Image (cartoon, grey):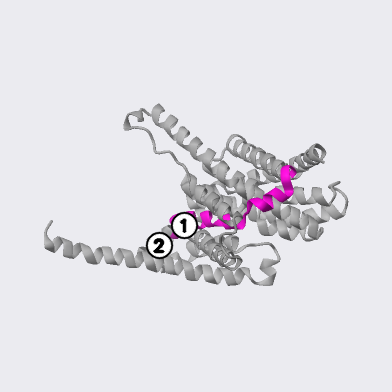
Amino acid sequence: MSTAHLTAATPAAESSTRGQLNGILFVALFAAAVTRIAAIPAIAGLGLSPLIVGIVAGALYGNGLRDGMPASWSAGVNFSARKLLRIAVAFFGLRVSLQEIAQVGLPGLAESVLIVVSTLVIGTWAGMKIMKLDRDTALLTAAGSAICGAAAVLAFESTLQSKPHKSAMAVGSVVLFGTLSMFLYPVLFKAGWLHLDTVGAGLFFGGTIHEVAQVVGAASNVSPEAEHIATIVKMTRVMLLVPVLLVVGVWVNRSARSSASHEGAASHGPRKLAIPWFALGFLAFVVINSLHVLPEAATSTLNMLDTFALTMAMTALGIETRISQIRQAGPRALTTGFILYVWLIAGGLGITWAVQHLFG
């Protein structure tokens, strides 16, 4: 290769790197503004985390003002929505400890496993078979309802490598039905319609409400004990993100190989296994948090930075989302979320009663 060619290529590479860094910086500044907006009492009171505000604000910008963003910045936006996302999901493990999960014992674990598995199965089946959604949209919607809201959608989006608008639809379902739960559940409990004691309320709230902030907001209206139990049960559901992602990774790989063989593409060799390695990182950080290796102040700082990184990822996903794509499947995805919401209330109550009866 000639010296002249190398000299010509270097400025282009530098320009590309500069554009990517500018894109990342732009998303970071956007996420900082989103974080301030999410801290406004009226918004925080609705249980809307910075992640949710980020994807909404990002989508508004992406669809209304994106022409003002230089094209070279797109690489930085994509980095934030993909690679930064994986790192942030791994660090999410610092919010969970095995000691906390042990506090609720078998009832909390049984509640979490039954809710997560049944909601994923029902959501994927209802989305694909009844509402005729594609596999990724159905899985993302089910994951957001089953595990931990927007964070689960992000983790699944990274594993499935799906389109940003599909994540936006799933997050929309989390926002609508999770916020509804935060206000509805305490009213139903105080009216005596749930037929649950304080422990049962903690199991039910933590087992069926979408976002961590929404769980805390709802259970705090019952009692401190119910809030404590609900939070731990919720974090147990978060822990289940790791085995579920590993199973989904294997399933996606098997489906892809099956599809390739039908198309006569098997001769190209085996497809690389879609194992979400960031999920193993998540598990490693759970262990680190459980061993109390890090000082409490360091863990708190890392959690704050992690929330900001997740907000950046959500904001970047929002910027890459197109409203026109959401319109095509929006009502069907929302209806799938509603089917899951009915299941979480009715089925969740049934599971809670069974768990309390079995382990009571």
**Which portion, as a residue range, is magenta?**
80-107
Determine whether, in the image, residue 183 is placed left or right of residue 10: right
Instruction: Report whether 100 appears left or right of 297.
Output: right
Dividing the picture into quadrants, the one containing residue 105 is top right
First of labels 2, 1 by sequence position: 2
Q: Is residue 88 magenta?
A: yes
Q: Position of residue 182 (x, y in %)?
A: 74, 57
- Name the foreground residue: 344 vs 244: 244
Residue, disc 1 = 81
Residue at the extreme right of the image, as rendered = 192
What is the quadrant of residue 175 in the picture?
A: bottom right
In the figure, residue 75 lies in which quadrant?
bottom left
Task: From the top left corner, tell me how far across and down residue 255 is, in percent.
Answer: 47, 33
Amino acid type, label 2: Gly
Residue located at (56% from left, 56% from top): 92
Mark 2–mark 1 Cα distance, whole angstroms, equals 9 Å
Give the image location of residue 160, x and y in percent.
48, 44
Q: Nearer the viewer, residue 228 or 310?
A: 228
**What secondary structure predominates along the stretch shown in magenta?**
helix
Residue 55 lies, in percent from the top left, at: 55, 60
User: What kind of residue is marked 1?
Assistant: Ala
The residue under label 2 is 76
Residue at point 49%, 40% (across, down): 249
Helix, strand, or loop for circle 2? helix
Q: Is residue 148 left or right of residue 74?
A: right
**Mark 1 residue element:** helix
Quadrant where the image shows the C terminus:
top right
